[in-house]
């Protein structure tokens, strides 16, 4: 593990069905909007919140921060997991902080490439 990023070994710790679901939702949001990133979070009740990058002249938000904001605005009390689909090497520190603020330290953040393959699982 380097810098809090645990590389995903093929076949080891493969995501379960609920984690695959948020990866698929994040991937779909990214593709649908032609955005740099797509993200999805799952709250403590199993509800999911999906977002893509917001890139307006007056407002810039990463997909992960937008998904967390949507969860908060909908009344989520905590997060079980998050997923971000991006070509970046790792989520920004601000993204992990947003997940940590709602989900607590150690909330898993699945980092997947545009093809949906999980590259790492990061503790927020």
Image (cartoon, rainbow, N blue to C red):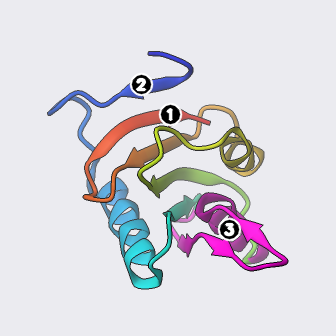
Identify the disc placed on residue 66.
3
Spot occupied by residue 68 in the image (x, y as percentages of width and height) = 68, 62
**In the displayed image of the protein, which residue is found farthest to the right?**
58
Q: Which residue is at the front of the view, 37 or 15?
A: 37
Q: Are marks 1 and 2 in contact (CB under 8 Å)?
A: yes
Q: Is residue 106 magenta?
A: no
Structural distance between the alpha carbons of marks 3 and 1: 18 Å
Picture quarter with the N terminus: top left
Identify the disc placed on residue 122.
1
Secondary structure state at the residue bearing disc 2? strand
Q: How many marks?
A: 3
If you read the primary sequence from the N terminus, does the residue marked by circle 3 or circle 1 appear first?
3
Spot occupied by residue 119 in the image (x, y as percentages of width and height) = 33, 39
* Residue at x-position 51% and y-position 63%: 39
* Residue at x-position 69% and y-position 38%: 93
Identify the disc placed on residue 38.
none
- What residue is pinned by disc 2? 6
Looking at the image, is 34 positioned above or below residue 14? below
**In the displayed image of the protein, which residue is found farthest to the front?**
57
Q: Is residue 60 magenta?
A: yes
Q: Is residue 72 visible?
A: no
């Amino acid at each position: 593990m380097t810098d809090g990023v645990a590389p995903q070994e093929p076949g080891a710790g493969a995501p379960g069905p609920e984690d695959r679901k948020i990866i698929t939702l994040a991937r779909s949001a990214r593709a649908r909007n032609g955005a740099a990133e797509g993200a999805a979070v799952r709250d403590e009740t199993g509800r999911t919140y999906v977002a893509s990058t917001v890139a307006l002249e007056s407002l810039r938000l990463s997909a992960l921060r937008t998904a967390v904001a949507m969860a908060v605005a909908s009344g989520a009390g905590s997060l079980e997991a998050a997923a971000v689909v991006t070509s970046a090497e790792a989520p920004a520190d601000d993204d992990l902080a947003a997940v940590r603020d709602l989900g607590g330290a150690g909330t898993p953040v699945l980092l997947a490439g545009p093809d949906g393959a999980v590259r790492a699982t990061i503790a927020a």
